[in-house]
Amino acid sequence: MRGEVAFDVTARALTTMDASNYRRVPLGVVCPRDADDVAAALSVCRAHGVPVVPRGGGTSIAGQATGTGVVLDLTRHMNRIVALDPEARTAVVQPGVVLDRLQEAAAPHGLRFGPDPSTHSRCTLGGMIGNNSCGSHSVAWGTTADSVRELTVVKGNGSVVRLGRNWQGAPDGLRALVEGELARLRTGFPELPRRISGYALDALLPEKGADVARSFCGSEGTLGVLTEAVVRLVEAPRARALAVLAYADESAAAQAAAGLLPLGPLTVEGMAADLVPPDAGLPRGGAWLFVETGGADPAQARARADAIVRAADVLDSLVVTDPAAQRVLWRLREDASGTATRMPDGSEAWPGWEDCAVPPARLGAYLRDFRHLLSAHDLRGTPYGHFGDGCIHVRIDFDLLTSAGTARFRRFSEELAELVVSHGGSLSGEHGDGQARAELLPRMYGTELVGLFERAKDLWDPDDLLNPGMLVRPHRLDENLRFAVLPREPVDVAFGYPADGGDFSAAVRRCVGVAKCRTTTAGDSGVMCPSFRATGEEEHSTRGRARLLHEMLAGEVVTDGWRSTEVRDALDLCLSCKGCRSDCPVGVDMATYKAEFLHHHYEGRRRPVAHYTMGRLPVWLRLVDRTRSAALLNSLSSVGPLAALAKRLGGIAPEREIPRLAPETFSRWWGRRFKERVRRMLREEAYGPETEAADSPGAAAFLWPDTFTEHLSPSVGRAAVRVLEAAGVDVMLPPTVVMQKRTPRAGETHHPWSVGARGHVCCGLTYVSTGQLDRARAVMRRTLDLMGVFLDPDVHPRPPVVVVLEPSCAAALRTDLPELLHDDPRAARLASAVLTFAEALERLAPDWSPPRLDRPVAGQTHCHQHAVLGDAADRRLREAAGLTGTLAGGCCGLAGNFGFEKGHYEVSKTCAEEQLLPAVRAATPDTLLLADGFSCRTQLEQLAGRKGRHLAEVLAEALDQGVDPGGDQGAD
């Protein structure tokens, strides 16, 4: 073979699961380069009797992308758009093409591929054909089978066939099989738009053109391996409008959906309130229909949406015409496959029976019966999905960890299958049968028709080489469950994992495989997962790392637990950007998992040198401050050979420049300034004020001297002081001595305190990111001790306001601190006190107006700000200051110590080239470059030769130049 062949631990661990409840350990993974490679792999596997599983994006929800033999990864090389013919409205694609790439290629011609599953940013055309996927626009453009013209397939015996109409490419005996069972095939399949279950043998009927390509769709890799497809494209509407219709509950919404179909909508999607955040901005109601309309222009699209609103009997409604606002609403619907995995109380919910379809007119009645069945089994779930097609998705809180729970899962599945059939429905309405439903196909089709499926499979694949156990002669629906191999007792860990009941296994189980982390673009504001976009390797995606951690806990494939080099190597390129914490629909937090793993992996062992240098950066920089050696070190680092030696010894990438240390730390500047103010106050007391007294400040806040502001960019701290004081905020620095309660002396009525140890506050970020969690805890406890008097509710009923300028440090205080010191109530109290610079101005000085600059801005929102802190206050502050434009998404790629570590430079640079550097290059000369994070500013300076600035610096400079809030320029 010319493609890659991998039988190592990592390759096998990454492909044990798809997005289903099932797990199988393969022998190995093969990444073919072309059809010849596919045939070669099949030849070897056939000779050894080893089954083969074709795999695309691995987002299948029924278990059909897992197997015990060889997995064919068709995404690595076979991912090209071979041709696109705008006149014929067709495209020729390889199976590994991601749907969004085809949409991007077709869009300039006013075309698109009709079906669009919610996983469109990572699902492949081969997987869509294998599952006969549909998506939200199926009411307009049907299923994938409706868009397939011809397919090139390698059969299990290695022969290559081209499938089409009029029996083109059919295996020997298939025509005779069909012609001998015409009556059964004409009557045995329910008539509904989303009948995906079983083999589509009815597509081979003569009145349907004996379409072998269409019949192949939905065969789940059991009949042949797709190597090329000719697909139909449709004309994309030039304008769209989205009508959001509110109903009392999902049954009412479902009942109304079918009545809207005659009005010609492009979509009729349903969601219930349990899946929608309270600030989503939807009209009042308990469930909603998202009904999209198209038109030749915005007015026509809007008119059609208004007509739908008039025809619908709704509680409330909203019509959205702005494309950006529509994307925000559609993101709610697309993320439902992930958000539905958690019940409102945080408990887990699972797929398996989240894909049934019934005739649209019966959907309301079916949902009511479905709710009764859930209650009868004491189960919960929130339906959503394609109401216009009668297709419902729902994650259910099955207990798949115990034998009793698994038995209930089986009983419910059997009863639900009967219910679906009683409503004239299909067990699968989009995702295929796989292992989840194939066992129950006789309840839908009867044993005779299922027997025909088996005979058809044998004609295509007589050796049963391709994906055995799927669709015919299936595995039981309650075996091979992926949870069975995980430890039953909680693993001893350092973080608290409050959202997962303190259970690391439950935290790892969060990843259900929907693979949003495998998107090849971050989008307008997303972050996750920069390392995957840089390398394209599954092991460097959030899902891939979660899979390796799952297998580490299972102990079957990854056998050396926390000492695993495979897990360590996969986590090595995790930037700890925390993007998955917010962008992953199920809230996987790989930055925390990485810190946890490194803590255990290096426990009692020697660490990489970068952990001692950059991981303990606060220690070394304070030593520099105490010895007043910043100038000396700056001079030495400017000497090439000495800098190279220092980088080599310190584990720093040779391509990097060593940042210059500030000659005066922020705290020393503050101390000097404080002394000058005291002297001035004494002079004023003796001789009268030198200037007119200013109004006394109304609010007070601690300004956090984080390591980066303190030693590397104190100008940011000085600027923040200037702005906060101009806004009327009294600024203080956190204490440097511990105030300890002592026993009251006789007659004392106040709180007795004594002075304890000296120290400096620190969020512990560098220790956490390198997994030095024992040191991180010690540093954090010292911080809590220093802030103790202000965190004591007996002394200060309301916690203080703590302004943190460095987003990564603010995020560490908000999340890592309370999760690592979950046993100390002071941690949560301090975390709740943390505000960003913009949040502090908004809360403490709501009437203050910043100076108007009226300038465009470019740059990047810090990834930790995006993931943990939010940037709404920053956007409002920029708007008030007349700073126009949006900041790029993604990650700058430096990410604290990551981009400085040896071996990470190329990935770091690739991340920066994704959004940040192009945005900066496209900026006009008068554009202000904003970057609140020290890492982002450093990356800009070292890779683009441009100086980024913190928002505080920009506002402070405007104040010093006498720019009034109204925008006028004046003298000081």
Image (spheres, rainbow, N blue to C red):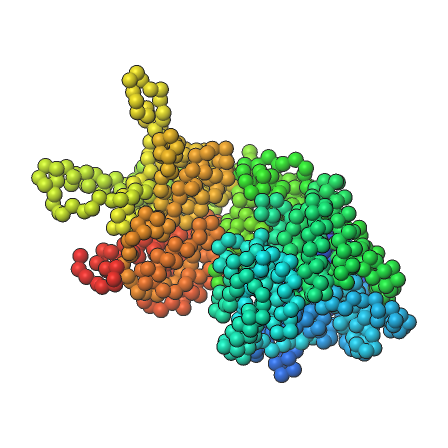
Q: Which quarter of the figure is the C terminus placed in?
A: bottom left
User: Is residue 232 depicted above or below 654 in this figure?
Assistant: below
Viewed as shown, does residue 746 lie left or right of 605?
Answer: left
Viewed as shown, does residue 780 lie left or right of 568?
Answer: left
Residue 43 lies in quadrant: bottom right
Q: Which quarter of the figure is the N terminus placed in?
A: bottom right
Query: How far across and down, in percent of the image, does residue 137 sit?
Result: 63, 69
Please identify the residue farthest to the left as the structure is shown. Answer: 687
Please identify the residue farthest to the bottom as the structure is shown. Answer: 87
Q: Residue at x 55, y 55 (%)?
A: 276
User: Is residue 57 depicted above or below 837 in this figure?
Assistant: below
> Residue 41: in sight, yes or no?
no
> Residue 256: in sight, yes or no?
yes
Please identify the residue farthest to the top as the structure is shown. Answer: 746
Q: Nearer the viewer, residue 831 or 35?
A: 831
Query: How far across and down, in percent of the image, does residue 172 sit?
Result: 87, 71
Viewed as shown, does residue 269 lie left or right of 423?
Answer: left
Q: Nearer the viewer, residue 954 or 498?
A: 498
Number of marks drawn: 0
Query: How far across and down, in percent of the image, does residue 23 sit?
Result: 72, 50
Residue 95 lies in quadrant: bottom right
Residue 742 lies in quadrant: top left
Q: Residue at x 61, y 81 (%)?
A: 86
Q: Residue at x 33, y 41 (%)?
A: 702
Q: Nearer the viewer, residue 807 or 236?
A: 236
Q: Nearer the viewer, residue 273 or 829?
A: 273
Query: How far across and down, in percent of the image, does residue 160 sit?
Result: 78, 71
Q: Residue at x 29, y 53 (%)?
A: 847
